[in-house]
Image (spheres, helix red, strand yellow):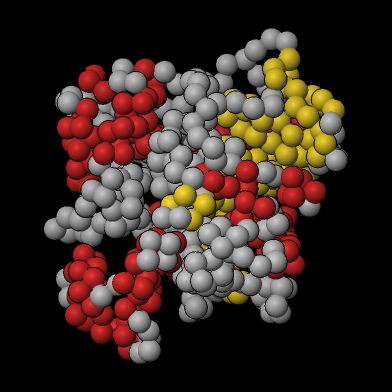
Amino acid sequence: MHHTKVTTAQGTVRGVQHDGVHVFQGTPYAAPLTGASRFAPPASPRPWSGVRDATGGSTAPTPPPGSRVNGLDMTPLTGDGWIEGPEYLTANVWTPDPGASGLPVMLFLHGGGFVAGTAQAALYDGTTFARSGVVLVTCNYRLGAPGWLHLPGQPDNRGVLDVIAALSWIQDNIAAFGGDPGNVTLFGQSAGATITAAVLAHPSSGTLLRRAISQSGNAMGAFTAEQATRVTHAVARELGVAPTIEDIADIPDRELLSAVTSIAGLDLATDSRPDPLLGLTPFAPVLTAGTLENQPAEAVEAGAAADIDLLIGTNTDEATLYLAPSGALDTTSDQDLQALAARLHTDPHTLLRDYRARQPHASAGQLRTAIMTDHLFASGSRRLAHIHAQHLKSHTYHYEFSWRSAAFDGRLGACHCIELPFVFNRADLPSLLGPQALLGPGPAPVAEAAAVHKAWVQFASTGDLSDHGGAGSAHPLRIQALTADSEVH
């Protein structure tokens, strides 16, 4: 392992070089966050003199890690916990050659329900992308209250603004790492995919991006102002303060984390709209003037992102992540189904009848999985795919990922997050394998992961996936090229 240096617009950074890959971690793309600045737009990164160490760094405040979710080990995706420090709006870069030029660039946004996760998680190591000829960037963005709490007088969607700032940093600096600022692909999973959709709706997206990939997001999942205000008042009650920036600005991060944790499960259904996230998280992008005036899919329908190539899709059994490890997949009753349908539809009986007609032999747990998968991820993704394809100015691809994990006696299936080890081509990571690990017991699906990773790299490089039909045992995803007349399968 050797040291390696790159000079950015703010100063010189020193990373490490190992087995032909150069890695720079913890380079700031925005200024540190303290006090009231945690709730303000991101400011420009501060320049430095000398050489700055780029081998680590702080992470966004996040609740204490629950290494297991109902017995499922999620540490490879969530990381080992909060690394404290105010300078956490940072980027990590993996490049095959800082002296190169014109390499495709990919920026990845992690998931975690807008309250958890980190770009430093083991699974998100970008070595495989660099070895595939890509400059891979990951970034930390604001989570929880600093990133998403609706506060009068403060900009909403600060987490989205952070990503815009990271993309601007890439435009200014990525050529120094060998990348092409004119060929940048933004890709994200879960919350990161929903943020990706919000960035597509942003007026600056056309100058910052060439392509985008949305993995299991929801382009119709933004909260209304009424829903966001309900969260604000709940957090303020937990803190014992008024729901204003003046009262919240100086509250320490740990107290904010505790308050957010205390309102878990808050039902945000209103008279006019169900909770788009079914109480899984109290945060999401907010419909607001300036950064997100319409749902992302609606903004794309109005013309946003027409020139940006899009690959978007979901996994077959997304909701089993929330049902299988806890045993709820097996214990779901007809009453549970009826309660879920009542949360989502004004005519719950018709909703259940339609799902039973499509899956006549499904168990109650399987129907619950299908309904939750559609509501949380699939329907919004299909809508964005269909709308984007109408513009005819760029490529649109829709995928379904169907590889099934054997974890929890095969019940985990093609759950939420399951595609990530394939995308990063890290299916042989030991912490992903085992009876209660994400990929389950048995041999690592190395060939399948290589095939999926190749598709992501090809899309980022050219935008063209016409030769990736998803056929064969090594292709656990089906990719559909869309036109204006296509039905999204």
Q: Quadrant of residue 478?
A: bottom right
Q: Is residue 353 left or right of residue 390?
A: left
Q: Quadrant of residue 463?
A: bottom right
Q: How many marks?
A: 0
Percent coordinates x, y for residue 225 in the rendering: 23, 44
Of residue 303 and residue 222, the one placed in the foreground of this image is 222
Q: Is residue 75 left or right of residue 326?
A: right
Name which residue lies at 49% across and 42% down: 117
Q: Is residue 462 left or right of residue 353?
A: right
Query: Would you place residue 123 above or below residue 36 in this image?
Result: below
Of residue 195 and residue 282, the one placed in the foreground of this image is 282
Name which residue lies at 80% across and 48% down: 131
Residue reaching furthest to the top = 49
Name which residue lies at 85% across and 28% down: 2
Q: Quadrant of residue 349?
A: bottom left
Percent coordinates x, y for residue 203 in the rendering: 46, 43
Query: Would you place residue 340 above or below residue 276 in this image?
Result: below
Percent coordinates x, y for residue 241 in the rendering: 18, 24
Percent coordinates x, y for residue 193 in the rendering: 49, 52
- The answer to whether residue 445 shows anywhere in this view is no
The quadrant of the image that shows the N terminus is: top right
Of residue 391 and residue 112, the one placed in the foreground of this image is 112
- The answer to whether residue 402 shows anywhere in this view is yes
